[in-house]
Image (cartoon, rainbow, N blue to C red):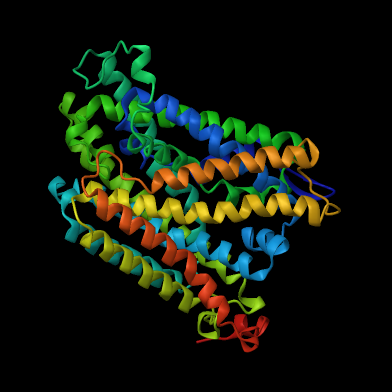
């Protein structure tokens, strides 16, 4: 699946597809997608067109033109200067501190099926699990244990691939066996069409985009792909089709098995397993899969803890971070950055508990904030791609969006406009959220604060912060 050539290691098309699918695929979003029933098919196709295609093509050109460590920081910095490069990578990191809450609450809700499923609706229980798991894994990462990187593939298999396969196969068996389902088995054309009469219904499109979001991180592999001009877009197409099919089937199975009024956005996967296994009088298997999914998800989280931090830490040599955040221990781990990240995770966990409404409302509010913060980063990325076509046309890009400058304007411009649409939609409460006014206030204030923080940090930047390799050699 990969080869060593005269130019070094090269990924085959198959290897790239597997790596990208492993990085992006998740079953956590099935319940949220399942809320719209048959409409999930159209929503998923829209997500591919408005997000996956432009984001993957633009990030591939940027990654092969400026492959240095730092990713979006380097791309935006080359186009608009260090201030905006730092802002972009800060937003990419900061949205993860919010986004991790959805992963950790999913783990907590899944764990609850081992002893008391009702705890999936208990915010205090969810908060305790968030804090215990995150800080426990953070302290383990201080030791720089290499084995945590090695368990990534096993975590994906245990926490995603096996459960997804069993859910889909078991769900299809349950449905084909003639058991009662929550959706009509003979949908009309109107059942597939999203309700465009209310903008709040379109908000759910954000959920389907989030299935693919983060594709710019996988673009770092673009320079390593054999025949990148052909295999990169082909690989993304294959990944998009596979993920779309899996997401649609998974969402529809959840929608068919669990009544929408009882669907828990965190525990919907386990609710679906419960229905499947109860129908064959093997309910104890629900607990087994709860354990399997939770352990797999914890393993994935353990391998992600350092990733976002390293992206931001890569800017330290340029003096963008104060010295206290540049400190590393004897294992080369940026301990203070990890501590700051842990504090932020704890803060967002507390916000989750204190937000008005039930578990579903709080989950959606943080989910939407993650999206708007990330979208601001995409605004900078798309704008940078267009600018660099003019300011640095001489830079060799192994992958280039065809059509010259016009082609870049079409692809990146379309992506920018679609991000603006998604930004507006994410600011609106869906019909399922009752706390409409507080939702909008939370979203506007939260997005502005998060976007302004890096600009404030940069404004206070001092020449003494630029200590280069010395920072990386500082030990506890």
Instruction: Judge from the rendering whether residue 241 lies leftward or rightward of residue 181; answer left or right.
Output: right
Instruction: Judge from the rendering whether residue 351 lies leftward or rightward of residue 43; answer left or right.
Output: left
Of the pair 129 and 451, the residue shown nearer to us: 451
Task: Say which residue appears at 19% left-offset and 29% top-offset.
Answer: 259
Is residue 12 visible to the viewer in this orientation of the structure? no
Q: Position of residue 254 (x, y in %)?
A: 29, 30
Instruction: Judge from the rendering whether residue 337 lies leftward or rightward of residue 198; answer left or right.
Output: right
Q: Position of residue 108 (x, y in %)?
A: 25, 53
Task: Say which residue appears at 76% left-offset and 43% top-offset.
Answer: 399
Q: Quadrant of residue 458?
A: bottom right
Q: Position of residue 300 (x, y in %)?
A: 43, 53
Of the pair 362 and 290, the residue shown nearer to us: 362
Task: Say which residue appears at 42% left-offset and 32% top-offset.
Answer: 247
- Residue 241, compared with residue 284, is above or below; it is above
- Residue 393, compared with residue 253, is above or below; it is below
- Residue 117, compared with residue 13, is above or below; it is below
Is residue 9 visible to the viewer in this orientation of the structure? yes
Of the pair 437 and 98, the residue shown nearer to us: 437
């Amino acid at each position: 699946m990969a080869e060593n050539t005269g130019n070094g290691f090269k990924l085959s098309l198959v290897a790239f597809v597997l790596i990208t699918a492993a990085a992006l695929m998740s079953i956590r979003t099935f319940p949220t997608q399942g809320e719209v029933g048959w409409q999930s098919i159209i929503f998923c196709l829209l997500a591919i067109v408005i997000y996956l295609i432009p984001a993957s093509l633009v990030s591939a050109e940027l990654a092969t033109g400026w492959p240095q460590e730092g990713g979006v920081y380097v791309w935006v910095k080359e186009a608009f200067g260090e201030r905006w490069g730092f802002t972009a990578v800060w937003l990419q990191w900061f949205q993860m501190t919010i986004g991790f809450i959805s992963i950790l609450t999913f783990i907590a809700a899944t764990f609850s099926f081992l002893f008391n499923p009702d705890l999936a609706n208990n915010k205090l229980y969810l908060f305790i699990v968030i804090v215990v798991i995150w800080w426990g894994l953070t302290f383990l990462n201080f030791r720089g244990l290499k084995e945590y990187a090695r368990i990534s593939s096993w975590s994906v298999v245990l926490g995603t691939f096996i459960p997804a396969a069993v859910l889909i196969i078991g769900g299809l068996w349950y449905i084909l066996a003639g058991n009662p389902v929550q959706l009509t088995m003979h949908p009309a054309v109107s059942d597939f069409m999203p309700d465009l009469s209310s903008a709040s219904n379109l908000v759910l499109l954000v959920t389907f985009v989030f299935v693919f979001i983060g594709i710019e991180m996988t673009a770092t592999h673009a320079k390593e792909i054999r025949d990148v001009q052909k295999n990169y877009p082909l690989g993304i197409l294959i990944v998009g089709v596979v993920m779309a099919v899996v997401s649609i089937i998974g969402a529809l199975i959840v929608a068919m098995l669990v009544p929408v009024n009882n669907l828990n956005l965190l525990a919907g996967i386990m609710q679906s397993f419960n229905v499947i296994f109860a129908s064959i009088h093997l309910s104890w298997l629900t607990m087994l899969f709860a354990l399997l999914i939770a352990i797999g998800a914890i393993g994935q989280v353990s391998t992600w803890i350092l990733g976002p931090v390293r992206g931001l830490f890569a800017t330290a040599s340029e003096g963008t971070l104060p010295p206290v955040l540049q400190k590393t221990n004897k294992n080369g781990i940026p301990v203070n950055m990890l501590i700051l990240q842990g504090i932020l995770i704890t803060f967002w966990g507390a916000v989750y508990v204190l937000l008005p409404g039930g578990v579903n409302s709080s989950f959606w509010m943080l989910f939407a904030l993650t999206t708007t913060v990330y979208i601001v980063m995409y605004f900078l990325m798309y704008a940078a791609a267009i600018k660099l076509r003019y300011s640095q046309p001489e830079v060799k890009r192994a992958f280039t969006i065809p059509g010259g400058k016009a082609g870049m304007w079409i692809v990146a411009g379309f992506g920018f406009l679609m991000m603006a649409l998604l930004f507006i939609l994410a600011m609106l409460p869906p019909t399922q959220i009752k706390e409409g006014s507080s939702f909008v206030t939370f979203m506007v204030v939260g997005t502005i604060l998060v976007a302004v923080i890096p600009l404030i940090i940069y404004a206070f930047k001092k020449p003494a912060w630029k200590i280069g390799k010395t920072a990386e050699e500082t030990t506890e």
